[in-house]
Image (cartoon, rainbow, N blue to C red):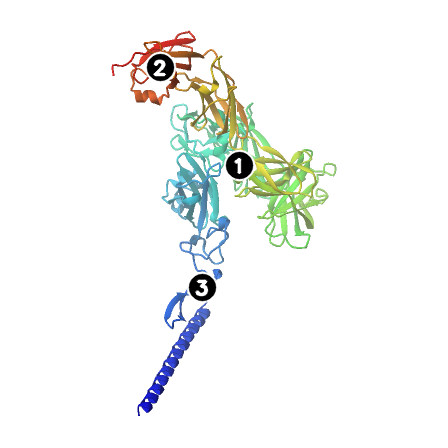
Amino acid sequence: MAGMDGKAHSKRMMAGLACWCLLLAIVVTLADAGRNDLAAQAAQAGAHESKPTLEAAPAAKLRLRLRDVPPSEVGPLPGTGTAAAKGEDNFPGLGPLPAGVPPEEEGVGVSLLRVDGSAVIGAVVRWATEEDLQPLLAADPQLWERDNDEILARVTHQVRTAANGWAMVPSKAGRMVIDARFGDLYTSRRFRREETSYLKLTMYRDLPLVVEVADASGAGLDVPVVVRTADGRGNQVLRPSNGRALLLHAPEAFSALLGRPDLYVQLDAPQQALATVLPRGKVPESSVKLTGQRGVDLQVRVEGLEGPCSSGVVEVVRPGSEPEVLRTTRRELRAGLAVFEHVQPDVALVVRVRSACGADVPEQRVQMPVPVVHLRHAVRMPRVQGSVQDVDGRKLGGYTASLYQRLPAGWELAASGSIQADGRWELAVPSLASQTAETAAEYMLVARNEFGATKAGLLQGLSTSLDKATFRAEVGLLRLDNWTIQLGGVVLDENGRGVEGAELELFLEGVPDARCRARSAADGRFDLRAPRLSGPLRVQVSHPGLAVPLVVDAKAGEKQTKVQVAFRGRLRGQVLVPAGVVPQQLQVTLHDAEGSAFGRTADAQGIYLFERVEPGPARISVQVVGLPNSVVSSDSVRVEAGGTAEVQALDLRGVLRAIVVEIVDEDGQPVEYGTVGPDVGGAEAASRQRLRPFEFRDGSARLVVPSAPIMLVVEADGYISQSIATTAEASVRVILKRSAQ
């Protein structure tokens, strides 16, 4: 009976176990079905978000986990409102806008760097969009012509740069103005949001300049003021309010140019000659005062053969002996009209125009007052048109077209424009108007895209194909050959960091070739494309931070060329010392253009050398170590970037001399240990210690002192301090008395 019960019990246990196994199988099946349903639903919905799923654990326990998501399925990034876009340095949100994403949901990335390439952290970045300023633009249509700082004073958008000098600026479609300040460093830029999503800006030292303009009676005169460098590269127009204008900064690279050539400040009106010259960009702390007069307005109307010229530039030049860049006032031509304000009533002027209406440049001399000057083009502007393909027959849409003309001095740019998507192009070429069969020039069309790919082809007989009736030349289909990279590499500064924005130009036949130019990227890398060459090359490198262009030698076909440029210079000199004086006992101090001071000692020959000196004025001072009143200074010398400035030798032979101080006690025995230093007039011992008194041992010290008498203090432990006056003698004997202690 017991056996029967045991068998029955075993059967019941087996049945129970079977039921538990069946139940577990059902649960696992349901879990798999649920997971498959979730996956199916996600696939149908096109969802890319991470979703929780069910999984049977080895220990038959259920738990949650996140499904692994491929990188292509990552959703929107926080703060961007767009899918991840690969841009420069792989920052999210950079590069072209994804399709269907409105511009206002994207940010503009900004990186701020110093001239030496180091990041500026904690700089204040301000910005304004066209939408922000619409109410102000309605009240003041000339707002965009004002200074960037003046515009941004009316908005409050700002952010600070974080690590690596990086900041993200929320953007809107349309024009934007942005600037940044960090201490006395400044930078500024204007751009269109649709054209960029990343800015790398170099911050230059801020140069504030105050200009006051008044008439003969002293009343404020709101005549525009132009600030320009002598070489004409920098040009900034200030618009005074109540006769006062403030240049808080110079946009982009202009501030780097201010410290190089002479700086001119003059009225932007054809009414007087050069007003003020600030040599070598020395901006005064006080106001620059200009005197003008309330003149008359001059209207210049420009017409072509088909009516008023819609665009162009009108120049008014005052005859005189100054460089023409200093005597010229320019105005944009709008709807055939340019207006010059406050023209001196009794001045003689030359009026000329550059526009797309005609090939000739009419020039007219007038004696003021003349209210209106009419300029008419008598000849149409010659235009050349055609279409281009590459060697494989592909259209070159999206390329820019540059037409170069060969002159005796080399190739010169004659016209530029863009190539349409279907490969068609059309350029206005003024030089064709004056060419004949005898003077026909050789032309070359060069096409480039944003990635640097370059293709070129010669245009034969361009002047003979010009239709004299329509002034158009149809050149048909051109197949352009590829220009390969003839020189590649990187531009580095003196610290080995990449230099952005360096302009490289290839020398061909001994002169710079305008067709073969390149600009270094953010990491300093460049590709210089040219016709197939062999042998040695010469390349000219220019940059706003360089005082003069650098010419380097290279070899055609090199792809890893390193071009080293220096934004700082060196300063070298010598001190001449009298017999018995060791140059190492002297402190040589450099005072650079930034107001900083750097000290070092000379070598045994008295020669010293300072590396990495900021460009600008600098001077040297020399003093004896421990004698602050022994300073001798040199005249100011100018340090140029990449150069070595030589300081005239400082002759100290009549200024310093060497003496021997013998220190003994009352018994005539040498004092073992003590110090000798300048007498500071009863100051505490701690103050004398900061003057670094000379330590002596065994009762003897050899000192360098000024030729003029000075007071010295001799101190030793256990002795009473004693002051002595140096004389013309070569040695001094000092007897110290023991203290009462």
Q: Nearer the viewer, residue 161 or 441?
A: 161
Q: Name the front one of labels 3 and 2.
A: 2
The answer for how far apart the CA atoms under marks 3 and 2 are is 84 Å
What residue appears at the point 44 percent right and 60 percent down from the top-left corner?
75
Of marks 3 and 1, which one's residue comes earlier in the chain? 3
Q: Is residue 689 visible?
A: yes
User: What amino acid is found at the position of numbered circle 3 in the picture?
Assistant: Asp
Q: Name the front one of labels 3 and 1.
A: 3
Q: Is residue 548 left or right of residue 175?
A: right
Could you say which disc has been placed on residue 493 in the image? 1
State the residue position of label 2: 671
Classify 714 as above or below 284. Answer: above
Q: Position of residue 494 (x, y in %)?
A: 53, 35
The answer for how far apart the CA atoms under marks 1 and 2 are is 56 Å
User: Could you classify mark 3 by the number of other residues whose Cα lies within 10 Å: few (under 14), some (14-19), or many (20 or more)?
Assistant: few
User: Could you classify mark 1 by the number of other residues whose Cα lies within 10 Å: few (under 14), some (14-19), or many (20 or more)?
Assistant: some
User: What amino acid is found at the position of numbered circle 1 in the picture?
Assistant: Asp
Q: Nearer the viewer, residue 537 or 387?
A: 537
State the residue position of label 3: 68
What residue appears at the point 50 percent right and 29 percent down from the top-left corner?
611
User: What amino acid is found at the position of numbered circle 2 in the picture?
Assistant: Val
What residue appears at the point 39 percent right and 33 percent down from the top-left corner?
241
Disc 1 on helix, strand or loop?
Answer: loop
> In the rendered image, which quarter contains the C terminus?
top left
Disc 2 on helix, strand or loop?
Answer: loop
Q: Position of residue 17 (x, y in %)?
A: 36, 82
